[in-house]
Image: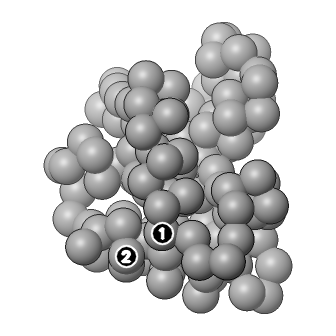
Amino acid sequence: MGQALSRSESREVAFRLVFATGNGAAFDQDAWALALDGKTAPAPEEQYINQVVNTFLDLREKIDTRISERLQKWTIDRLRQTDLAVLRLAAAEMMIGTVPNAVIINEAVKLAKKYGDAQSGGFVNGLLAKLAE
């Protein structure tokens, strides 16, 4: 068994799953194994990951609409796929409502900086601030 996940690492696993399922992959054991990358998810973290990914899958159209409505001079299909996955993850977390928006935004910016380009952090921060209003 690998090392147990922290909440930030669980959020990164959820990001990977939202990215994969948002691009057509199944939300199954194979996706879980790839996203976990050798680590283990204790029950609370597994529950969190499932809740966020299932919220995204259940409310994807609503989440994408909320993101699209806040884009200026841009369309959702033109977004970098990693930025879109971060935005979808954060929007799903905001809809669940158990984590303060400031924490969600901060964590999303970290993911955007890690997986996106030089502008991703600022872009994600600005759009999520509008989404949180």
Q: Quadrant of residue 66?
A: bottom left
Type of the residue with mark 1: Arg
Residue 51 visible to the viewer: yes
The mark nearer the N terminus, 1 or 2, is: 1
- In this view, the residue farthest toward the front is 73
Q: Is residue 52 left or right of residue 39?
A: left
* Front in this rendered view, residue 31 or 36: 31
- Give the x, y percent position of residue 4: 50, 40
Residue at horizontal 61 percent and vertical 67 percent from the top: 111
Q: Which residue is mark 1?
A: 70
| Mark 1: few/some/many CA within 10 Å (<14, 14-19, 20+) | some
The label number, if any, that marks residue 3 in the structure image: none
Could you tell me which residue is drawn at 76 percent across and 22 percent down? 25
Kindly report which numbered mark, 1 or 2, lies closer to the viewer in this rendering: 1
Give the Cα distance between marks 1 and 2.
Answer: 7 Å
Is disc 1 in contact with disc 2, using a CB cutoff of under 8 Å? yes
Say which residue label 2 marks: 130
Please state the horizontal and vertical placement of residue 108, each as a whole percent of the image.
51, 67
Q: Residue at x 49, y 75 (%)?
A: 127
Determine the image quadrant of residue 104.
bottom left
Residue at point 70% right, 71% down?
Answer: 74
Secondary element type, mark 2: helix
Q: Position of residue 19 (x, y in %)?
A: 70, 42
Amino acid type assigned to the residue bearing label 2 in the image: Lys
Specify whether 47 is left or right of 27. left
Q: In the displayed structure, does residue 102 sit left or right of residue 30?
A: left
Q: Secondary structure at mark 1?
A: helix
